Image: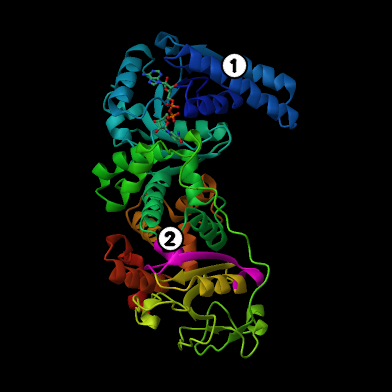
């Protein structure tokens, strides 16, 4: 029992508020939908009606339940009508002054026991509570978009939030069949703290000419099993939103990875915001998959972790074929071949080719098949080219792997290729957040799986892949790139030291 009967949603005419109002009314609560815009409220009422209509069509709700739920929702543009609410959830503009002002006004109007919750993504709950006159009754309640569909809620306490407030708000979310996780009042809580720098890294990788946005998405989906590629996600949330998030994060965290990448600003200036403006990072370019491939010969020398003994690909080779494949880092130039493929670990292709940037028409192509620890090797092949790589050699390499059924992407000879470049700093962040007590390992992983559709959380994955291996990869990346984000997290240093 929470003692909460009547709830108000401030900003119910907006994207998040409209969804939260649906959650509250569906949970059985009398729900006041408050916004300064009556038009927005009318639009969202029609949208709620449509949403519940679909639930009825799908058999998730009876027509009577729909009518009763809609009847529990009332619209208001008069703050005074919130006076007798037990819980008020604000989802108004992301502006500290505006949110503090709203809570200050509500403090004058509402009962002393009313709890105020904020859906802020980036602001501090303690700072917002500072304007409320009841900072023990203010709590962070961060829903995911779309709130009416996503179950996860990140719950956080301000410094002065009372245990009673927190547990009552927590119980209320559970009564609405949501799934709360506890996190600290820190910028971005769990989800955005991991996502904002990661998405910036993605934009910087594209800006650095690492690969196309299309190939980046294929790599992340195929290699890591994410449901949605990061460029698709960025186009969906909007590059203007990413600018705003970076602008909110960087001054607080001073994390260089949180700073807005120049390309992101240029895209916004050019009106390429993503789906909402009709064009964004993804250009719609797709390459036809090869249906025929030249023969290949495995002339490999070293041991390959990614093509363990018995792997079907190893048996497909034919001696004397036009493409030769060196496994485990071996390499011998052979100009008589269409392509000479070199399997890479953390090193760059240039290590093998001697950085022959001036040499015309090198037929050497690097490749790596992504594998996390002792998991089964993924289906992803990252092909690595240098500025002088012969396009014919690259096409032959692509065809060999595509015809064998792999997902093939092409990237420049830059540290970490696509997967390690992007995922290793995120693992470092997650390990560091765990040290700092941001949340439990279980809650951090759960948040990523539920909020972002990852098949497993970053902590589970980095541990499965081996913290010692994480140390080796990040140390190599830091040496090559000089970027502090690659400095191995404490847990990886400890694991390495302990062998
Ligand atoms: P939005 O612009 O879609 O909606 C904001 C709504 O608040 C508008 O309808 C506006 O009329 C209303 N509003 C603004 N000031 C008001 C005031 N003083 N009184 C009454 N109504 C007011 O914004 P949004 O994307 O829904 O974001 C709202 C909040 O939710 C922000 O704090 C944001 O950080 C957070 N959030 C957003 C997302 C997301 O993906 N959009 C996800 C989680 C949290």
- Graded by Cα atoms within 10 Å as few (under 14), some (14 to 19) or many (20 or more), the crowding at tag 2 reads some
- Graded by Cα atoms within 10 Å as few (under 14), some (14 to 19) or many (20 or more), the crowding at tag 1 reads some
Q: N-terminal of the two: label 1 or label 2? A: 1
Give the side of residue 99 with respect to residue 43, left or right.
left
From the image, state whether disc 1 or disc 2 is nearer to you.
2
The residue lying at 29 percent from left, 47 percent from top is: 259
Q: Residue 208: image x %, image y %?
A: 36, 58
Q: Residue 278: image x %, image y %?
A: 50, 36
Residue where numbered disc 1 is placed: 72
Mark 2 Cβ inside 8 Å of ligand 1: no
Residue where numbered disc 2 is placed: 423
Q: Is residue 419 above or below residue 115?
A: below
Front residue of this view, candidates 10 and 344: 344
Q: Which type of secondary structure does the marked residue at label 2 adopt?
A: helix
In the rendered image, which quarter is residue 56 located in?
top right
Q: Is residue 378 above or below residue 35?
A: below
What span is colored magenta in the figure? 401-421
Front residue of this view, candidates 12 and 379: 379
């Amino acid at each position: 029992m929470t003692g909460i009967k009547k709830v108000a949603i401030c900003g119910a005419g907006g994207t998040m508020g409209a969804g939260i109002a649906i959650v509250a009314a569906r949970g059985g609560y009398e729900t006041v939908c408050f916004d300064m815009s009556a038009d927005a409220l009318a639009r969202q009422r029609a949208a709620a009606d449509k949403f519940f209509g679909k639930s009825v069509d799908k058999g998730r709700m009876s027509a009577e339940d729909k009518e009763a739920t809609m009847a529990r929702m009332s619209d208001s543009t008069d703050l005074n009508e919130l006076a007798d609410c037990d819980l008020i959830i604000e989802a108004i503009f992301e502006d500290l002054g505006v949110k503090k002002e709203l809570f200050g006004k509500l403090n004058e109007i509402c009962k002393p026991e009313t709890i105020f919750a904020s859906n802020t993504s980036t602001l501090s709950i303690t700072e917002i509570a500072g304007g409320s006159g009841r900072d023990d009754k203010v709590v962070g309640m961060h829903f995911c978009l779309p709130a009416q569909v996503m179950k996860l809620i990140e719950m956080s306490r301000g410094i002065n939030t009372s245990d009673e407030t927190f547990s009552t708000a927590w119980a209320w979310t559970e009564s609405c069949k949501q799934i709360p996780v506890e996190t600290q009042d820190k910028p971005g809580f769990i989800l955005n703290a991991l996502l904002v720098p990661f998405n910036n890294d993605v934009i910087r990788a594209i800006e650095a000419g690492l690969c196309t946005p299309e190939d980046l998405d294929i790599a992340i989906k195929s290699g890591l099993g994410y449901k949605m590629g990061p460029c698709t996600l960025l186009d969906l949330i909007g590059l203007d939103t990413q600018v705003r998030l970076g602008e909110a994060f960087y001054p607080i965290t001073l994390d260089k990875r949180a700073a807005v990448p120049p390309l992101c600003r240029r895209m916004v200036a050019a009106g390429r915001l993503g789906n909402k403006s009709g064009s964004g990072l993804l250009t719609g370019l797709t390459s036809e998959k090869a249906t025929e491939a030249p023969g290949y010969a495995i002339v490999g020398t070293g041991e390959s972790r990614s093509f363990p003994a018995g792997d079907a690909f190893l048996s497909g080779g034919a001696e004397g074929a036009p493409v030769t494949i060196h496994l485990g880092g071996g390499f011998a130039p052979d100009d008589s071949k269409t392509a000479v493929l070199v399997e890479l670990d953390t090193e760059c292709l240039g290590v093998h080719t001697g950085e022959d940037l001036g040499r015309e028409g090198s037929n050497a192509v690097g490749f790596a098949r992504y594998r996390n620890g002792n998991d089964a090797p993924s289906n992803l092949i990252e092909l690595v080219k240098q500025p002088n790589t012969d396009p014919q050699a690259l096409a032959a390499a692509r065809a060999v792997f595509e015809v064998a059924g792999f997902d093939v992407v092409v990237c420049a000879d830059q540290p970490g290729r696509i997967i390690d470049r992007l995922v290793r700093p995120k693992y470092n962040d997650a390990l560091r957040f765990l040290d700092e007590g941001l949340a439990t390992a279980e809650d951090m992983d759960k948040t990523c799986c539920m909020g972002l559709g990852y098949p497993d959380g970053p902590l589970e994955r980095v541990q499965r892949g081996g913290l010692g291996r994480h140390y080796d990869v990040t140390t190599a990346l830091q040496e090559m790139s000089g970027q502090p984000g690659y400095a191995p997290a404490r847990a990886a240093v400890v694991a390495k030291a302990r062998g």
